[in-house]
Each structure stands twice: as C-alpha cells, then as structure tokens.
Amino acid sequence: MTGGKSGSTEARAVDDFLSSASGGPSALVIEGDAGIGKTTLWLSALHTARERGFAVLAARAAATESVLAYASLADLMAHAGTDWRQLPDPQRLALDRILLRASTDAEPTDQRTVAAAVLSVVQILAEKSPVLLAIDDLQWLDPSSALAIGFVARRLTERVGMLATFRTNSHRDRAPSWFAPAPPAQLTRTRLGPLSIGALHAAVTQRLGRSLSRPQISRVYEVSAGNPFYAIELARTVLDQPPGARVSMPATLMELVRNRVGMLEPAVREVLLTVSCLGAPSIQDIAHATGRDADDVVALLDAAEVQGTVEIAGNRVQFTHPLLAQGCYDDATAAQRRAMHRRLATLVTEPELRARHLALSAPTADPATLQALDAAARSARVHGAPMAAAEMLELAIGLGADSPKHRIRLARNYLDAGDPARARALLEDVIRALPPGTQRAEALSMHAVVALYGESFLEAAELLERALSEVGDQLPLRVQILVSLSFAMLNTGDSAAALRIVDDAVTNAERLGHPQLLGQALSLRAHLRFRHGEGIDEAGLQRALELEDNAFMPAALRPSMQKALLLGWSGQLDTAYAAMVGLRQACIERGEENELIHLAFNLFQIEMWRGNIGNASLLAEDAAARAVLLGTDLAQGVALTMRATLAAHAGREAEARADVEEALSASRRCGAHILALWPLTTLVFLEVSLGNYAAAVRTAEPMLSQVNWDRQTTELVQAPFLPDVLEALIALGRYDEAEPPIDALERNGHRMDRAWMLSVGARCRAILLAAGGDVIAATAAAEAAMVEHDRLPMPFERARTQLLLGQLQRRRRHRDDATVNVSAALAVFDELDTPLWAARARAALARSEVDTGPAKLLTAGERRVAELAASGMTNREVAAALFISPKTVEVHLTRVYRKLDVRTRAGLARRIDQLKT
C-alpha cells in the first residue's frame, strides 16, 4: 500500500473491516515503519466506528519498561462503561484488581479468570451494539494483557472488531497471529507505505501551517523517504532556520529526534525523562520526581509543548509521538536514567512498579531491590498475572540473584502463564545442575506437572517416581508428589498402583494436616476405591468436600468433581448432571478451558445415558471447537470419542470407525490409556449393532484379558463394554466365557445395589438362558431386568431389554405382549435416532403392521435448538441453556430455517408446533 493515492486504499481497508465487524468477528492490523502514520489512521478508524454506533474500547500501549501488568487491559476496561454487577463474583473481583480498585487480601485471582471476565464484558456490550477493541502499538503490549486479549480473540463469535497498529522493524516484521479471531474470521493486514511528494507536502503544510519551497520539499522528501513524521520534523528544522541559511539534515529519524531533544534546556530534559519513565504521569508526579513545585514543572513543560514534543491534557502529560519518548530516554546518560528510576521507586505505591524502578536503577543486586522484586512477583500472582511475576523473577536473576529456587519459581510462573516450553527448558537445566536431594525433587515434581499439562502421562509418572525417591522428609512436597503420581498412574491405566500410592498420600496428608492436600488425596482415593469395587466412600468423600476451597486446582482433583462423577457412575444420573452443570459454570466463569473439556465429556456421557441425544450432540460440537483451541492430544481424543459415539448410535459406520481410530491414536500419543476405554467401547457397540459379533469380541479382547472376574469390579466406569461383549460371546456360542462376567455383574450388583449392573446382568442372563433353550427362565430374567430399569434413567438400555423381552414373548407365542414391548422399544429407538436398533425392532415385528412415523427432517441437535428458539429464547439464552456457543446456535438455526423452509421466529414456532402434532 502507498500513501500516494490520498489514503483511499487505507480508508477502504478500514471501511471493509468495520462493515465486517458489524456482522461478526473481524480483525485488522495496520502495519508500518515508525512515523509512517499508523496512529493517525487508527484514530480515524476509532472516530468512524463511534459514528457507526460501535462501543469503542481503546488502549495505547507504552514503550516504557516500567508498566503494570494488565496496563493496556485496564485502559480497555476503563472505557467499557458496563454494569459489572451482573458478572460472576470471581470475574468482578478480577476486573476490580486490574483496575486497582480491590485489595489483595482475598484469594489470588487466576489469569484465566481475568481473561474470562474481559470476554464476558465484551459479550455483554456486543448484545447492544458492535464492539471495537482497538490497541495502538501492539508491539509494546504488556505480556499479561496480550495473553488475556488473545484468549478473548480466539473465543469471539459476536460482532466484535479487533483493530491494532504494529510497528515493523528488522526484528519483527509482522503482527502476532494470536490477535486474530478463530476461523472462519480472518486477520487482515494492511501495510502503510511512504507518501508521495505531493501528499507529503500537503501533510507538512497542514501540520505546521507553513509551506516549503519546491527545492526544500524535494530535499525533505529525499531524506525522509516519504515518512510523514520524519518529514514534518525535518520541515520544522528547515523552517526554524533564517532564510538562506544552509541546513544540515539528520541522516536518520532517531538522530533527528535526539537533536530536537538536545535543543531543550537541561531542566526541561529532566522533566521529559520523568515523563518517558512513567508513560503519562500527572503534573504532581513529575513535581515529586524532580523535586520541583507544580508551577515550575508547568513552566518547563511549556517549551516542550510549544515545540510539539508533549501535550498536556488536563493534569496528564504525554509525548505526541512514541519516538519522542524513546528519544528523551535515550538522550539521558545511563547514570541519569538510574537516578531517575531510583527517585521514582520512592514515589510509586504499586509493588510491581516500585520493583521495576528499583531494578532499573541498580546495575547489580542489592537486598532491598531483590526483596521488592520478590514482593512484586507475589503481588502479580495475586492479581492473576503470572507472566508479570515471571518478569520480576527474570529481573532478579538478571541482577545476579540466580538460584535453583528462583528458577523453579520462574518455571511455575511461565507454566501458569501458558508457556510450558519455557518452563520445561528452565526445569531441565535446573535438574541437570542439581545433585540428588529435596530441591531436585521439587524441580522433578514441577517438570512432571509440565508433562501433565502437556498430557504426557507416562513421562509425568517417570519424573514423579524419581522425585519421590529424592524428596526426603519434606512432607508437603511428598504429598503433592504422591497425589500427582497417583493421578498419572490412573491415566496410564494402572489403577491398582494408583490406589496404593493414593493410600500413602492420605496417610502422609493426615500427618501433615494440610486441608487442601488432604482433600485432594481423600477424593482421589474415593474415586479409585470406587473403580476397584469398594463402592462410594461416603465418609472420606464428605470429609474431602468439607476441606475443599476455592483455590484453583484441576477439576479432576476437586472433591466436588469426584462426588459428581461417582453419582453418575452409580446411576444417580439426574443428581450428577445438576452437580456437573454447576461445576461447568464455575469453570466458564474462571476461563478454565482444560477443565471444560473434562466436564463436557462427563456431561456428554450422562446425556447419552439419559437419552438426551440432542444435548449430547451439542456438547460434542462445543467440545470439538474447544479442542481446536487447546490443540492437545487429550482434548482431541475426547472430542473425537464423543463424535464417534454419536455416529455409532446414529448408524454412521464409516464416520464412527474413522473417529474411533483417530481417538485411539490421540490417546496413545499422550499415554492416556484410560481414555482408550471409551472409543473401544464405542467400537464394540458398533460391531454388535451391526451384528459383527466376532469383530466385537476381537475389539474387546485387550480389555477382557486384564480382568479377573472373581475380584474385578464391574462398575459402569470400569466395564461399560461388558453388556455388548456378553451379547457377542453368546451369539458366537462361547457360553462358558460369558458365564463368569454375568455372575460378576449379578454378584456386584446385589452387593452394591447398582441398578445398571442388575439390569444389564439380568438381560445378559436372559440372552444366555434363551441360547440354552430355557425360554421361560429367560423371560423371567428379562422381566427382572425391566424392574431394575425402572430405577435407572437410561432409556436406550431399557429399550434393548424391552426388545429382548418382546422377542422372548413372541417365542412363547404371547404375541400381544410381544407386539406391545417391541413396538415400545421401536418408538424409543426411533426417538433416539438409532436406526440399526430400530431395524432390529422392525424385523422382530415381522409381518405386523406398525406405524414407524414420518421421517425426521431435523437432527436431534437441530431439533433441540429449534424448540428452544421457537419458545422465544434469544440465541444467547439458547446457548446458555444448552452449554454451547451462540455461534453454534446460529449455525444450527440456519440449517433449521433451510430444512423447514421458514424465515422468521414466528414461522419457526408454527412449524415446530406442526411437527409435534
């Protein structure tokens, strides 16, 4: 792009961007060299956006090294003007903290909660009007703000535009990709080039109010290469000289800036140095820093203001261009800069700013500076800014306070800030340098946490075993290692070892008396005991719940999450669902994406079991979108398993097989063998649904080979594949192999009063008895199974048993009863959109005339969205009710409108009513 076309290309880019943002997420970055006019175009875009009704949130990032974490984010939120009382408490506290309106006495804020709060504010504003998030000088954005804004960008579905300027240079020529919204939205880049000589002359004349002669403007154009800021400053130099004087023009822009600053009196330059160190200070700030009274400061600033170096807006002072701030800072000697930072450190009250100024004032470490940096790092963590905490620790290390302890803390902060690669590199260096012992055990333990976040469970287990051998008598660290090791072993598939280890963790946690660690250990032990057939440890779980606090911990280790899981796995599906919905909402409020995937999978399973296929399909779609954002193997494996399960139930064989294979590959890559159970279960179900019994048994053999039926649990979470495998074994005539698992289901079902075990156990017993020719006993077993199904809200499983009962009744010539039961099963199979099982039911009805109903126009997910939309809900309300994004709702409604040939909500409501009748 060039400036020689009167800005028409730039104006068109801005116009296209704002038009796009009026309808959905869009991003535009204005790139170019320093002084090329990026900020001018940015300001013009802000003005145009306001004229078009946008809510504009703008921030101008500062080049100064002494800036608070979330400085730019605070500027953005200061313009939001929304009522934050409707935000969840954690989000409201997070925003108050970044705006320095709340104390640090309460529990620390998590970085993800800050990001989630900003996303909520943007979404609230977007309900009323389009929103523009605008950042000038993106290259100087503080890291904490960048992480939060990147989080928001990837999750935008509303009409939000993201606009930024970015200074290109030899080190970085393009704006970072994190600024872009998620596909299908795109990041557009427009690069400003030099102005033509005519446009440059017009810009100089407009800014300075005076015109240059043709030779003068030609010379200015030649030296400036069409850069408007450079040209205006050169022209200022030319016009300040007497007529006819020979003018020596600086060869570079920075030389010109330094010359301009150098023309000022030393006292003025000292005042300007203060401004360059603080960003946009008040007159009083400058007066305190320089030891002058306010009137003297104003008088000194007058010269710089007349020169066009600074502007005074109210009580605040700022440079007219970032290059001038840089020039003033560079013009000072190193000693002058250190002295200024030392004075400023005595004036500022925020721990982070004080520490930064102290660090910049000291060439080497001193106790006061190191103490300030340590306090600032802790303060930054309380504010939810681990990247800022990492910066404080890096400064301390750079000043000479290098130690394994500092580097382990630094790694923890980089991990929490979303940079596991940097954390891993630091820890590997520390581990290599340290001898065996407690400190190396701490580093190994932290390295294992990095591996767990990267979902490499085998690597994590190996690191934790090494750490355990070196931890010594440090009880808190030992308990942390044991809990993490138990969790890692569970995910690798060795639940027996996991249970032994967590027992040790509970014993040590009891000795330690640490509430949070004891709560984690107790809840994980309850989980593992359940898997091993010991039922729900009510006392231990209740104690863990009483010890649970609101501090961040992975959802998988939260006692409340363990309680919800055990409720679901023991058949209390409705209660489990309600508990998980509450946990999911809390995760959304905190921005905990990894935890949302974990919860989505368990909610999905409950909805599949409860027969809410529409909700399950929407959860699967939402999980797929989140998996793309997370980009991890575990997240991808979970999302693919959900999709495969839906495909298998819907009879889409090729799709189900492909997704199962990919899910298994993902689980192998991350070592999460526990995850592989579910895609394998889906494949076994698909083979049985197709009548491929031999293939079903082959698929299940790796799982069956690890089972000892005399002592192995048959809980739903451990053996979800068992009913299908038993049906396949019996169909293949392998009765002796089917008998022990059926006995185990019946025995364990009675021992723990599990309706699932008793119902599917009785059904499998009925199939086995029928295969042996005892149809009367088989019928009795099927009827007993139906009684147990009445205690269990699993309509698909009930329909399978009812189909079997009808088939047995037909064999006994009880045709009326048979027709009633098979027809009822068929109705459920049709309602749940399971065509392979519906075909079985139709075949069982043989020559009976049964109305199978009209073909469905909509998928289960589309039908659920349509029903809620037809009831009068907005897209956002539908999304909240179904736990999906508004964009997903919009996509479904587009398909629904097309399929039903309607164009309005009123038409949709009428059509849905017609379909119901």
Image: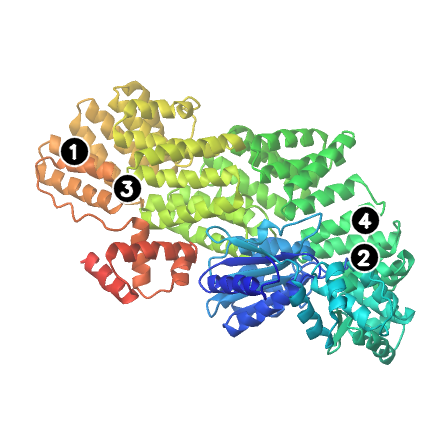
Q: Amino acid at mark 3?
A: Phe
Mark 2 or mark 3, which is nearer to you? 2
Q: Amino acid at mark 2?
A: Ala
Under tag 1, what secondary structure?
helix
State the separation of the CA atoms marked 2 and 4. Answer: 39 Å
Q: Position of residue 511 (x, y in %)?
A: 67, 40
State the separation of the CA atoms marked 2 and 3. Answer: 80 Å
Name the residue carrying label 2: 251
Figure quadrant of the N terminus: bottom right
**Mark 3 or mark 2, which is nearer the start of the sequence?**
2
Crowd tier of the residue under label 2, counting other residues whose Cα lies within 10 Å: few below 14, some 14–19, many 20 or above: few
Mark 2 or mark 4, which is nearer to you? 2
**Mark 4 or mark 2, which is nearer the start of the sequence?**
2
State the separation of the CA atoms marked 4 and 3. Answer: 62 Å
**Residue drawn where x is 51% and y is 33% of the image:** 672
Figure quadrant of the C terminus: bottom left
Name the residue carrying label 1: 807
Under tag 3, what secondary structure?
helix
